[in-house]
Amino acid sequence: MNPIKIFKAGNDAENNAAESIWYENWLLLKKNRSAMFGLYIIIFFVFLAVFAPVVAPFDPYLQNIDLRKMTYFSWPYILGTDDFGRDILSRIIYGSRISLVIGFFAVSISLVFGSLIGLISGFYGGWFDRISMRVIDIMLAFPYILLTIVIVALLGPTLLNAMIAIGIARLPQYTRIMRASVLAEKEAEYVEAERSLGVGNMELMFMSILPNCLAPIIVQATLGVGSAIIESAALSFLGLGAQPPTPEWGLMIASAREFVSNAWWIVTFPGIAIVLVVLGFNLLGDGIRDVLDPRLKD
Amino acid sequence: MDNNRFLDIKGLNVSFYTQKGVVPAVRELDLWINKGETLALVGESGCGKSVTASAIMRLVPSPPGKIESGEILLDGKDLLRLTEKEMQEIRGDRISMIFQEPMTSLNPVFRIGEQIAEVFITHYNMDKKGALAKAVEMLDMVKIPAPEKRVRDYPHQLSGGMRQRVMIAMALSSPNPGLMIADEPTTALDVTIQAQILDLMRELQKSIQMSLLLITHDMGVVAEMANRVAVMYAGRKVEAGDVYDIFENPMHPYTVGLLNSMPSNEKYRHAGRLEAIEGNVPNLLEIGSGCPFESRCRYAEPLCREKFPDVKEAGNGHSVWCHFAGDIKFI
């Protein structure tokens, strides 16, 4: 029995109306400090991304040849300028837009298609299951970054294609997780009970089984946003993602790597931004996993 | 008389195709239930009771299960000839089912009100609001206190007895409840709750004139609920008849064994140990053509091993499948 429920029942007569499972999980998550810290980091960057034009002191594309490689804390360029005299802080703020979009977009691709394939192959089995699982096996046999690079090379090196490539390359994980949970869930008694009430396959699959399989997928997706951001930075670093002069964090590091000895701040601050965002998603993801893992509950 | 039969199963055979061979789970089963009547299907674990129930619902897991032959007539219509879509309309409409495990038979992520309302949305084309109002009504009918609050509960917030009530409410929500199959509805509940649930089922059955197929291994529940009894053993029906005849004059050694293992049997009124039926259900893969109970029967003769007995009638619809029925003097 979890302590929150007892507390509720004992003290809050009006709140006796049942709380949803998600609300209860949220209460548990709120008590997890590192997860909340991660969430605050994410909220901070989302805020930066949404209000970038307001928050950023300068135009991220504005070049100023006279002010090249200004060091940090040289007012008004708080984090200094890069080799084209562009304000690094503004570029990082605008870069958060790109990174977050990449993270969510790439994860959405693998989440939607991966889960769908996993759901169908787990539920129906048969030839669809056999074929899709063999394809997944083949995809998993490739080194992950190599697979991403191959897909980008096929599609062409743009930011959108990098996102698609990351999404496709990460898809097998979601398929596997979803299929495993569906296989376990479809043997549950409530599925048979609902069948006996005349519920059809489609409804069973999407309305009954899917909601019960969401927990591990949510954890995977949260952690996945962080890794997608790293991977897009890596692709941009390799010249396969965003193209100059886009203020993409990985690209910022790549294009300034020759100055790392005499102007380290140009490389370091975008790096710190990547680390922070990824850390945020990882902390939140771990926290969600702790909450949703039944073995750690009660 | 036949017209009165609401459910009429004729010559049902269900097999499971496993790696070790074909397991005949139900063989040549004849079973019928009249309108408004309760038939108890009795037997120990693994004798084919639940498979029979799944076969009526056409929910035998396939593969490995397969309904080989037979007819399942519901109100004169053969369920085995319906398409999957037609069958889906019958499930939850004419036939509904209550399961053994109330703890796991409800979907954990939805409020119970939503789950009951789902039945009304599916079978009555009601809107969500009206369906939820009906859900409250149904919870009230199965005597859940404060139903307007309880509809907002999740299954994990209810006790086992309450969940079973919710399951009954869902089963009763069907538009034309003709037959309810209760697969060991009280096995997972404690004794006080058992009695309440049984009372509730009997009361509701009377009020809507529904037929009830009660699957159980608890002879106490049978005595309380049933009009007629069918005893199954290893996939075969071995004895069937009126509940009084079965309890007063059991003719199959297996039925006698079941009755003797009841704590409330008169034999035990003055202490003494419970009597067990020695041995286990035989492996269905190894059953020959003889009587399946032969290996455990203390009255078995060589004939029993060779041939499954023909039916013997003892009047009043009491039939028994034993070579020596009526000849044996039970101690």
Image: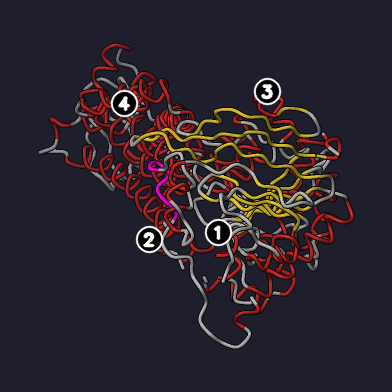
In the orientation shown, which residue stands out farthest toward the front? B327
Residue B17, percent from left and from top: 42, 32
Q: Which chain's residue wears label 1?
A: B
The reply to the same-chain question for discs 1 and 2 is no
Question: What is the distance, in whole Å, between disc 1 and disc 4 at their CAs?
Answer: 54 Å
Identify the residue at image location x=39%, y=61%: A295
* In this view, the mark in front (1 or 4): 1
Number of the label disc, if any, that sits on residue A34 = 2
Magenta-drawn segment: B281-286
- Residue at image mark 3: B81
Chain letter for the residue marked with disc 3 in the picture: B
Give, as a three-letter code, the residue at label 4: Ile
From the viewer's perspective, is the residue at label 2 or at label 3 nearer?
3
Q: Secondary structure at mark 3?
A: helix
Question: SS of the residue at dot 2?
Answer: helix
Q: Is residue A2 magenta?
A: no
Q: Earlier in the sequence, mark 4 or mark 2?
A: 2
Say whether residue A177 is visible.
Answer: yes
Q: Position of residue A8 (x, y in %)?
A: 63, 73
C-alpha separation, residue under disc 4 versus residue under disc 2: 34 Å
Mark 1, mark 2: which one is toward the viewer? Answer: 1
Q: Position of residue A229 (x, y in %)?
A: 33, 36
User: Residue at label 4?
Assistant: A136
Q: Are marks 4 and 2 on the same chain?
A: yes
User: Which residue occupies the foreground of this view, B1 or A253?
Assistant: B1
